[in-house]
Image (cartoon, grey):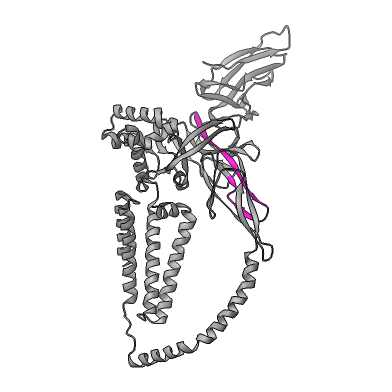
Amino acid sequence: MCLLSEDDLFGRILKVKNLKENCFKYLEDSSKELLTQKIIFAMSELTSERMGPVKLSEIAQKTTGQNDKGKQDLVRLTIEKSLLKCGLVEKLRYAPNDVRYILTAYRFQKIKEIDSFRGESSEPIGEIFELPKSTWPIPDEFYILLAKKFGYEKSLNKLHADFDGKLIPRGKYENLNSEYTKSLNQICDKLDSSYAGLETLVVTES
Amino acid sequence: MFGLSTLICNDSSAFAQSGKLSVSFEDGVAPSYDVALSSDGKFSLTLDYSWVKDETSRYNLVSYSIDSGESVKISRSARGSFTLDVPSDSSQIVFSAVTQHALTVTGTNDFSFLPSSPTQDNWFDSGTEVSINVGKATEIEKNKVRQEITGWSLDKSEFWNIEDDESTFFITPPVTMNQYHLADFFMTTKYKLNVVAENGVTSGSGWYKQGETVPIGVVSSNDGLIFNTLSQWEGAEIEYDGNTAQVFVDGPLTVTAKLEKNYSLVIVVIIVPILAVGIVVAKKFKRHAPVIVEKTVEKTVENSEPIYSDKYDEDLSIYLSEQITAKLDGMHSSKIISDFKYLKIKEMLTFQETKTS
């Protein structure tokens, strides 16, 4: 059963979620030892592996090393008291006995709310915080396409250089150039159509 | 509890009890009973169309036969009473009824049953199959806010997602009515995003969930050599870096692309011919020198024929594989790919290569 579409997962990666200081603190280094932060990172990692929302027992196992009822209750309470209230986590009920959790975003902006005579507004503080890219829910196909795109670009450069250096005859050069360029274009088309916006985010900003 | 009520009416105030009418039900769906009749009176027999079988099912009248005669169908109804004028010479009447179960739908009001209920409500004859036809979107505020169904469950035990496609209706697979069923539909609120521009074709308009970040764009039309170029977006909080624009949906929105005239093409059209003339003139002066170089090359070619590798295709293919692997390794070491995914992808690529070779 497909629990969430890839589009939904991408939406969560592309979105930058504004968080007030009292919620943003869960992502900061000062909360490194807190269960709340461990849950966020565990959920991110598990979601990336499963490519969908994760169960409480899995989060409990990952964060505490156990998944008995006591640990699950502890994790559930932590999620409900802090992460759900802050809008960091979404709770999805698929059936009465099948509840799963997923992060609402993977990039966060700390904001300060300003209440002035002009009305309420908010002001960003500092840079955008990103959860580790290796834990973003991106399908394997995307990485393969990126690697192949790089490979074909490099190979075409070599092909041109070798032709200039007279290492291959014109006929063979034209054939290989056409074949490799076609493959590269197909890869680029697929990246643009299925993963628009993601390449820039994953590669350029890394 | 048996809730069937029957009523015998006689319009003769002083009739003499001279006959007996036996009333019974096929398959014992209700107790049989006898009624005393007068030979010179007119009699009416009245029965409820439906009566309770148990907590989740009921019986519904479908036909009757008098004195083992031909079965006569009854126009079916869920509620109310059925009245039959009984001929005075009748001695036996047998009614038939079927078991019905209810199908309750929650979460939406925009639905219908396929086929519809024989009793024009949400009760269906036992053993029949019924699908539910649900409108996928319900407008709350015209062209601004609507609710869309995202999934449904049957008897709160199984859950299915409903694909977000262009269709306006969703039809469930057939549900067999052998017991009471509850179909629950889940809705999500969506807001309309309108992307508009005075000149040009926009992209990004549509219905989106709250919190979505939507890429928007405009392809402007031109007035001859004068371009209309995008200067800014107005109407909402838009992230625009000069090339791509994204709008954060937090309610119904209309964003407008503000375009301005760009005369760069006019300038280019004037400058390019001048440059072209300049290049041609410059080439005329330079043409002699390369001729000497070409002659030198010709001499070299005469001396030694280039040696080409027969395995160049193979070598290039190996180089391609090496570069793909190098990129993957790079993404892994820069922590873009997790160990888990890296190993999985490596395995996949190795398998593909083995298959190809």
Rendered location of residue B312, percent (x, y): 33, 76
> In the figure, B188 relative to B94: above or below?
below
Taking the spot 31% from the left edge, 68% from the top edge, the residue there is B357
Picture quarter with the N terminus of chain A: top left
What is the magenta range? B179-206
Residue A143 sits in quarter: bottom left
Q: Is residue A192 magenta?
A: no
Taking the spot 34% from the left edge, 40% from the top edge, the residue there is A41
Rendered location of residue B199, percent (x, y): 67, 55
The one nearer the camera, A73 or B92, is A73
Q: Is residue B40 left or right of residue B70?
A: right
Q: Is residue B28 left or right of residue B349?
A: right
The one nearer the camera, B262 or B76, is B262
Rendered location of residue A140, percent (x, y): 37, 53
Let me know if residue B128 appears in the view.
no
Residue B115 sits in quarter: top right
> In the figure, B270 relative to A129: above or below?
below
Q: Is residue B72 left or right of residue B291?
A: right
The one nearer the camera, A86 or B167, is A86
Let me know if residue A34 appears in the view.
yes
Rendered location of residue A96, percent (x, y): 42, 30
Q: Overall secondary structure of the magenta stretch?
A: strand
